[in-house]
Amino acid sequence: MTAKIESGVAIPGNELSYLFNKLVNVGIMQFLNHNSLTVIQLEWVLLLMSTALNMSIPNSTSGGVSFTDELRARQQCIAEITEMIHVASLLHDDVLDDADTRRGIGSLNFVMGNKLAVLAGDFLLSRACVALASLKNTEVVSLLAKVVEHLVTGETMQMTTSSEKRCSMEYYLQKTYYKTASLISNSCKAIAILTGQTAEVSVLAYSYGRNLGLAYQLIDDVLDFTGTSASLGKGSLSDIRHGIITAPILFAMEEFPQLRGIVDKGFDDSANVDLALEYLGKSHGIQKTRDLATYHANIAAAAIDAFPESDDEDVLRSRRALIDLTFRVIKRTK
Amino acid sequence: MTAKIESGVAIPGNELSYLFNKLVNVGIMQFLNHNSLTVIQLEWVLLLMSTALNMSIPNSTSGGVSFTDELRARQQCIAEITEMIHVASLLHDDVLDDADTRRGIGSLNFVMGNKLAVLAGDFLLSRACVALASLKNTEVVSLLAKVVEHLVTGETMQMTTSSEKRCSMEYYLQKTYYKTASLISNSCKAIAILTGQTAEVSVLAYSYGRNLGLAYQLIDDVLDFTGTSASLGKGSLSDIRHGIITAPILFAMEEFPQLRGIVDKGFDDSANVDLALEYLGKSHGIQKTRDLATYHANIAAAAIDAFPESDDEDVLRSRRALIDLTFRVIKRTK
């Protein structure tokens, strides 16, 4: 037996498949589909970004790897890593919030207990780290490790009980960047770096992701109040009911400073929610939030327009799709 | 305001310090002290390993960085990363098990809810990733990312409900490697790699960590039955009461195959626990587990003895301390 003990211990693939079987049995695929089939399909954006940047690079430092299958595989790897980090954060967020549903589907941690949700998240994070390391690019590793830190930072920022912070637009936008826009912006940048693009192009790719992410979240915040209709109070109101103050209320507060007193009382009392909605209805909060989202969507589109010229049809088609996405994000109703 | 929005978003250090203040307020230091002041002080082992390997390296490929402050700082960084991964796994394990105490101290997730425990673990993991990336050594990143995966694998292996697996010594040892020994063995290897040692020396460093970790866990399993005394039933019996089958029972089962039927019934009924203890008392299970621990401790010590010769007094003193630790692990009573 001792020989057995000392022999190398092989990774028991079937043990990890145990975890996956569990996940599949309780409908992880359903869970993932329902979370990922939002207007921004993260992985899809990143694959479009990859193609959009696959033009020939003058004085490339990437050793002429552009257009090769290997480069494509590395870009695809970034997209998968990003998706893994994204899903891991969703799984852990559900544990955090003791959420019993996520978009109507029973959340994984509700169905199976916290145990598998935390484990599955950790497993995805570790797989993301292993995949990252295999890319052998320390700048990219750093970028995406920072993203995980940002996701945690955003979550802690949202937990603040300071009235001053909760009522600050600047604080809200920082939190939104960390929670939503950091992942997509830094993944876009990572793809540009892997593709061997210049620092200037990497910044444009980052800017696209950052502004698309911010626009997406701002519209999300509007839809929480309006739902698919344009009328107030038709959304799920889940943010405000959880005491989370978002852009529409913050803009309304600029017009009606007395709203702050209502916010400070908290929203455990639904009469207080109604009062806040009343002020929001009288204000331009919803429209100003939409305007700000449009502003960010336009910056995102401008970043793509500023990419170095290319006459490759695939490249141009991908860029058009990325720009098209900036409009769809603004117009989405769910 | 738009200028503000578009300006770079600085990391709000005070938000992360919010998390830390929370942690300190609820006694994270106490929590950590109580978990880390075990006989194996992980960080301490790694710093000893660093010094033990800081001899001159013939034909070094590390560009002659040995003995420099920079090398020392990088080794220290590995020790800190390892400790971060370790604490993160403890925090998440507590969430997993809905544990309300850990070694008698109210666990963090009990005191503050799952939310902060998951966040704090994720935060430590992300910090570990950032620190790892800063070392700019993809082999080391890979090694330590694998460790996180192993911790998850070990946890899922422990969740198995298959009788065949739960009653297999080989399965138990694999699980023990993943849950306990992988972290220390791969960290030791990472230090050897960073120090610019040969592959042969790296394998010895790995072997030390692996065998020390296995010996530590085997004694832990014995103490769960005996506690500080040598008598059966004086320990906390927490493993068997949670249905976790460890080496003493597995060895006893080799002598008394009828024990398997008892194990298969589960241990919700404390009469069944008593019955299992009776068989364990009649068997050589405890002694055979101690023997196996001693066997592994000896391999660990032999690995240090096989390190390349050195006449540096610091190096020799560190090696003696590492060997001394292999004896202390065997003799510990708590």
Image: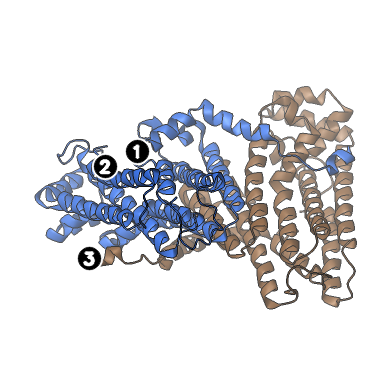
Chain colours: A blue, B brown
Q: Is residue B108 visible?
A: yes
Left or right placement of residue A200 versus residue B32 in this view: left
Residue beneath label 2, please? A328
Secondary structure beneath dot 3 equals loop
Structural crowding at the residue carrying mark 3, measured as other residues with C-alpha within 10 Å and reported as few (<14), some (14–19) or many (≥20): few
Name the residue: 89% across, 42% down. Answer: B287
**Quarter the C terminus of chain A occupies:** top left
Q: CA distance from mark 2 to mark 3?
A: 25 Å
Mark 2: secondary structure: helix
Q: Which chain is disc 3 placed on?
A: B
Residue B300, x across and y down, in percent: 85, 55
Q: Nearer the viewer, residue B84 or B134?
A: B134
Q: Is residue B115 left or right of residue B271?
A: left
**Chain that bears disc 1:** A
Mark 1: which amino acid?
A: Thr
Residue carrying label 1: A38
The image's mark for residue B1 is 3
What residue sits 34% from the left and 54% below the top? A208
